[in-house]
Image (cartoon, grey):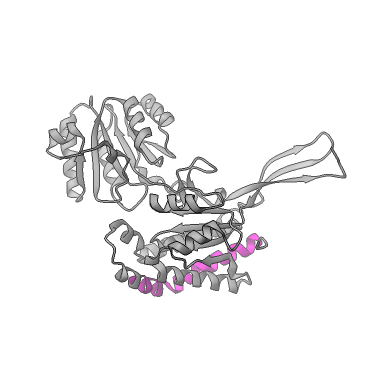
């Protein structure tokens, strides 16, 4: 186990990493072009996540600098108690130890996730996808340079060049200490990790997010929120499903307008029986599609009786990620937000805000759809466990 580095040293490494990303900006973009050209798959959302441009490098730099500016999440006192026998007891945050992240396609994760893990005193093992190998190895090289220049071991950030078989073998019988695994990707990756892992796994699960347009909705807000929810189809916080209250005034005009706006954005619109029939759309053939995360230029619109029915459908079919109600009625919004079982619930706002940076955490390791030990974006302050410190003068029980 690596000895915890001082907070000054951790911050110095992060700030040097930000400088190196700036210095090597063009080189990173050029290497990434090679990855993009070599990608032969047909998954448009994966390709979107793979690509690194100036804006992506800007985000990486911002993430490293922001992490350096944040308070140390390790050693924070959560609870203290003076025992009647005179012992002084504290509960403080502590690093997990070694964290493995398995992810697909996104070179920016190699900066942001490694940065969060490192700042919170953890050794990080990165297992990226083969499609982004060159980009990831270049970024890891910069991590090692930043660590070496600050007289810290390069062991803190390690890249695992494993294929599927080697990954399975490592999960089942790790060749080094492993305290936590975070798989970021599709359901197959998550199922594979859970099946083979021998230590705790935090699931960064599927999106499949819902917007419910209540009968008292502001229709301009509804259109803006739905279109924004579809503005980045590769994001796990994108909107895939929309419920329209059957008692919405001017319902038909609203749906017609919504469909035409979605079509303008090249989004394919599917409908349930009522919506498809009234709007000449392709009708869904099975309710199973309500479960699906699209990660595509596609959206499904259905009609719903009321708030209660919308809550029941979301709780049955969503991925437990994000959901939004559009309404002017505060008490209906409260009912929806308290009873929908997703990590983030919104009232008159876009699900695209489910993101560590947007929710004030400065970045995220992943977005957890589990309930233990952290739900939603996992930021710096969540990548810690805790530890009891008990100071005595010879007390025995």
The residue sitting at 53% across, 62% down in the picture is 125
- 326 shown above or below 239: above
The quarter holding residue 215 reads top left
The quarter holding residue 345 reads top left
Q: Position of residue 169 (x, y in %)?
A: 51, 61
Q: Is residue 363 visible?
A: no
- 385 shown above or below 6: above
Q: Position of residue 175 (x, y in %)?
A: 58, 63
- 14 shown above or below 316: below
Predominant secondary structure in magenta?
helix
**Residue 30 falls inside the magenta stretch:** yes
Q: Position of residue 20 (x, y in %)?
A: 49, 71
Which of 171 and 74 lies nearest the eye of the viewer? Answer: 171
Identify the magenta region: 5-33
Q: Quadrant of the C terminus?
A: top right
Which of 39 and 342 lies nearest the eye of the viewer? Answer: 39
Q: Residue furthest right?
A: 394
**Residue 205 falls inside the magenta stretch:** no
Left/right of residue 365 with respect to residue 96 in the rendered view: left
Q: Position of residue 259 (x, y in %)?
A: 18, 41
- 368 shown above or below 324: below
Q: Residue furthest left?
A: 280
Which of 281 and 346 lies nearest the eye of the viewer? Answer: 281
Q: Is residue 273 visible?
A: yes
The residue sitting at 35% across, 29% down in the picture is 312
Left/right of residue 185 with respect to residue 10 in the rendered view: left
Left/right of residue 175 with respect to residue 138 in the rendered view: right
């Amino acid at each position: 186990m690596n000895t915890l580095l001082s907070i000054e040293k951790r911050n110095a490494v992060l700030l040097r990493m930000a400088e190196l990303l700036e210095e090597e900006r063009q080189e990173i973009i050029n290497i990434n072009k090679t990855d993009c050209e070599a990608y032969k798959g047909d998954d448009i959302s994966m390709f979107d996540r793979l690509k690194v441009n100036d804006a992506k490098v800007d985000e990486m730099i911002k993430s490293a600098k922001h992490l350096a500016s944040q308070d140390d999440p390790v050693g924070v006192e959560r609870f203290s108690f003076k025992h009647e026998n005179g012992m002084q007891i504290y509960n403080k945050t502590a690093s997990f130890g070694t964290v493995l992240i398995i992810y697909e396609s996104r070179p920016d994760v190699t900066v942001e996730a490694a940065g969060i893990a490192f700042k919170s005193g953890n050794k990080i093992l990165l297992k990226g996808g083969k499609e982004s190998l060159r980009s990831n190895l270049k970024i890891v090289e910069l991590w090692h340079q930043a660590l070496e220049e600050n007289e810290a071991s390069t062991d803190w950030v390690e890249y695992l060049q494993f294929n599927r078989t080697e990954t399975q073998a490592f999960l089942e019988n790790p060749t080094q200490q492993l305290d936590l695994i975070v798989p970021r990707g599709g359901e197959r990756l998550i199922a594979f990790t859970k099946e083979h892992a021998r230590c705790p796994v935090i699931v960064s699960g599927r999106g499949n997010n819902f917007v419910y347009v209540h009968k008292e909705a502001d229709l301009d807000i509804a259109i803006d929120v739905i279109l924004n929810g579809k503005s980045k189809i590769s994001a796990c916080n994108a909107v895939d499903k929309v419920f329209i209250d059957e008692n919405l005034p001017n319902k038909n005009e609203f749906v017609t307008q919504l469909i035409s706006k979605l079509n303008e954005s090249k989004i394919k619109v599917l409908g349930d029986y009522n919506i498809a029939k009234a709007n000449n759309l392709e009708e869904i053939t099975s309710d199973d599609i309500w479960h699906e995360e699209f990660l595509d230029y596609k959206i499904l619109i259905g009609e719903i009786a009321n708030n209660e029915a919308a809550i029941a459908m979301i709780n049955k079919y969503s991925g437990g990620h994000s959901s939004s109600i559009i309404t002017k009625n505060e008490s209906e919004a409260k009912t929806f937000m308290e009873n929908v079982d997703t990590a983030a619930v919104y009232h008159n706002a876009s699900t695209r805000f489910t993101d560590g940076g947007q929710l004030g955490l400065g970045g995220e390791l992943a977005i957890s759809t589990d309930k233990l030990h952290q739900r939603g974006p996992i930021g710096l302050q969540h990548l810690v466990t805790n530890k009891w410190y008990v100071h005595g003068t010879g007390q025995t029980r």
